[in-house]
Image (spheres, rainbow, N blue to C red):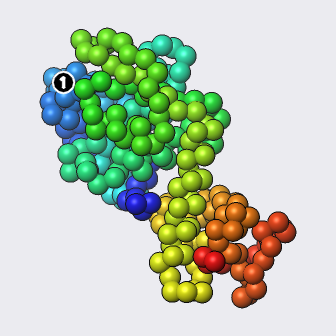
Amino acid sequence: MFREPAVILDVLRETDRDRLVEIHTDSTLRRFLGGGLPLDQANSRIDALLHVTPKLNWALRANAAGELLGIISLDQHHDGVDAEVSYVLLRVAQGRGIATAALRSALRHAFSTMNLHRVIAETQSANEKSIALLTRLGFSPERQLIRFGAQQTIFSINAETFFKLENSRIGLAIVALCRARSDGVTICPSEVARALWPDDWRAHMKDVRAVGVELAKANDIEITQRGIVRDPNDEIRGAIRYRVK
């Protein structure tokens, strides 16, 4: 299924402290992160997240006014070389696709805005759910090591792999939405962007249009403009629509 929940990467605020305390002290949430922290240690880490640590830490929310659902960060890995993405969700946010959507957003920021070549993720080898998520998003296992008294697996993904999979996801969404319509009924590219990125769909319209052109060249769909089928090899400007052939 290509649809994912709306989730934004937002700034962390002092008003998030109670939920941040839960994230850092809940032994179940931190089962694969070394266990829950004592309250004083948790608050010290939270102070660093909010005020000190100069790294990319985001609050996960359904919208700008929403309560904290979890946190995700991009930071230098223990190896001192790679950029590492890490995340943790509150219990109420788990099982809803939020981690998937958040990781996609963080990776897009890493590759599009920060121009990183690759990103890694380290997870306990026993954390089957995390491994399944990373694998689904295109990460590949690289090596294993012992850290914090447990076996860890290092996964990595590069920019080329990420954008290839993102384009495939866009293509599947275009075709699925077209096929959901009656014969000959078209869809607007914005419908695809809204389905995939409900919170900032306009920022992705260029990507949707580019993938649409490739699908049309492969004869998977038709691009129409004012009811006329356009040649995908031509430069097409202005409003367009898609339909399956």
Q: Amino acid at mark 1?
A: Gly
Depth check: 1 or 64 in front?
Answer: 1
Residue 150 quadrant? top left
| Residue at screen point 78% across, 68% down | 232
The residue wearing badge 1 is 35
Instruction: Give how far across and how far down residue 38 sits, in percent.
Output: 16, 23
| Residue at screen point 48% across, 46% down | 104
Residue 32 quadrant? top left
| Residue at screen point 58% across, 71% down | 190
Up-down relation of residue 28 to residue 225 (above or below): above
Question: Mark 1 packing: few (<14 Cα in 10 Å), some, or many (20+)?
Answer: some
Left or right of 113 on screen, residue 105: left
Instruction: Give how far across and how far down residue 29 sits, in percent.
Output: 20, 35
The C terminus lies in quadrant: bottom right
Depth check: 39 or 113 in front?
Answer: 113
The secondary structure type at the circle numbered 1 is loop
Can you see residue 158? yes
Depth check: 199 or 235 in front?
Answer: 235
Up-down relation of residue 240 to residue 67 (above or below): below
Left or right of 25 on screen, residue 239: right
Instruction: Give how far across and how far down residue 196 sits, in percent.
Output: 49, 61
Up-down relation of residue 226 to residue 218 (above or below): below
The N terminus lies in quadrant: bottom left
Depth check: 222 or 76 in front?
Answer: 222
Can you see residue 242? no
Q: Number of labelled discs?
A: 1
Residue 218 quadrant? bottom right
Instruction: Give how far across and how far down residue 180 sits, in percent.
Output: 47, 78
| Residue at screen point 63% across, 42% down | 112
